[in-house]
Image (tube, rainbow, N blue to C red):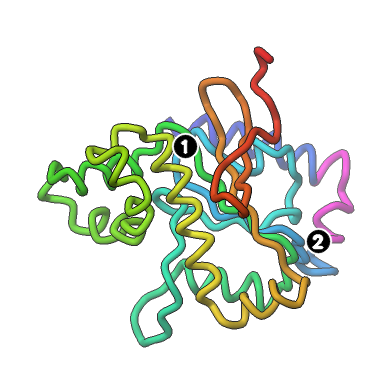
Amino acid sequence: MVTSLIDGFTDFRNDFFGQDKAFFKRLIRRGQHPKIMIISCSDSRVDPAILFGTRPGELFVIRNVANLVPPYQPDDQYHGISAAIEFGVRDLGVEDIVILGHAYCGGVNALCEHARGEAAEDREFITPWIKIALPALDELRGSDPKFENIKAVEQHSIMNSLDNLRTFPWLAEREKQGSLALHGWWFDMDSGALWCHSPPDRSFTQMIPSVSE
């Protein structure tokens, strides 16, 4: 099964070390200076570099189940996501952070199952992880108590992650100063549309329409 990866790497090598031999030499010499951080889902169908047509060195990507951001909690525990956010903001100086959610998110579906009392009992890590997004359900509980509108939960989870980003004091300070901007995007895999978060009314609007429109 990994043969396709080896073939793909051969193509990559030919492109970036053959036709453009100087490309990676420039990246090595200058180091990495991405301006954009994307926090996206681990879902195999949602690869930020492919979705946005970027080249090596352009994005600082953090991927995890359901594109979640935990709240600021400095202690001696393991905080891989928070460590990556800190490195991207404080060391690399990214200027934009995008929380990229998507349709048919398995992590968000697990969140809804947990809220309905239907979660699998043998998930040692997924269930504690998706609980980060439980606050996202508060605004939906009155109108959708069984959380059947997965799209709404996915989008509210993005807003919850944006709220959690702002609990990091050195990140919030940069946003306040205008040197850092936060964005929430949702990718509709049904239509190819890209939706963006509209902060004033905590809603999402289409930024790029579906292919049928």
Choose top left, top right, bottom left or bottom right for residue 88: bottom right
Choose top left, top right, bottom left or bottom right for residue 196: top right
Residue 56 vertical position relative to residue 80 in the rendered view, above or below:
above
Judge the density around disc 1: few (<14), some (14-19), many (≥20) Cα neighbours within 10 Å. Answer: few
Choose mark 2 or mark 1, whichever is in front: 1
**Disc with the residue nearer the chain's start (2 vs 1):** 2
Residue 148 vertical position relative to residue 77 in the rendered view, above or below:
above
User: Which residue is more in the foreground, 53 or 1?
Assistant: 53
At 31% from the left and 56% from the top, the residue drawn is 134
| Secondary-structure class at tag 2 | helix
Q: Position of residue 124 (x, y in %)?
A: 18, 58
Residue 27 has which mark?
2
Q: Position of residue 213 (x, y in %)?
A: 69, 15
Residue 20 vertical position relative to residue 169 in the rendered view, above or below:
above
Residue 6 vertical position relative to residue 41 in the rendered view, above or below:
above
Q: Which residue is mark 1?
A: 44
Instruction: Tell me if residue 26 is in the magenta stretch.
Output: yes
At 13% from the left and 46% from the top, the residue drawn is 117
Instruction: Tell me if residue 128 is in the magenta stretch.
Output: no
Looking at the rendered structure, the kind of residue marked 1 is: Ser
User: Which residue is more in the foreground, 12 or 196?
Assistant: 196
What stretch of residues is rendered in magenta?
A: 17-27
At 47% from the left and 37% from the top, the residue drawn is 44
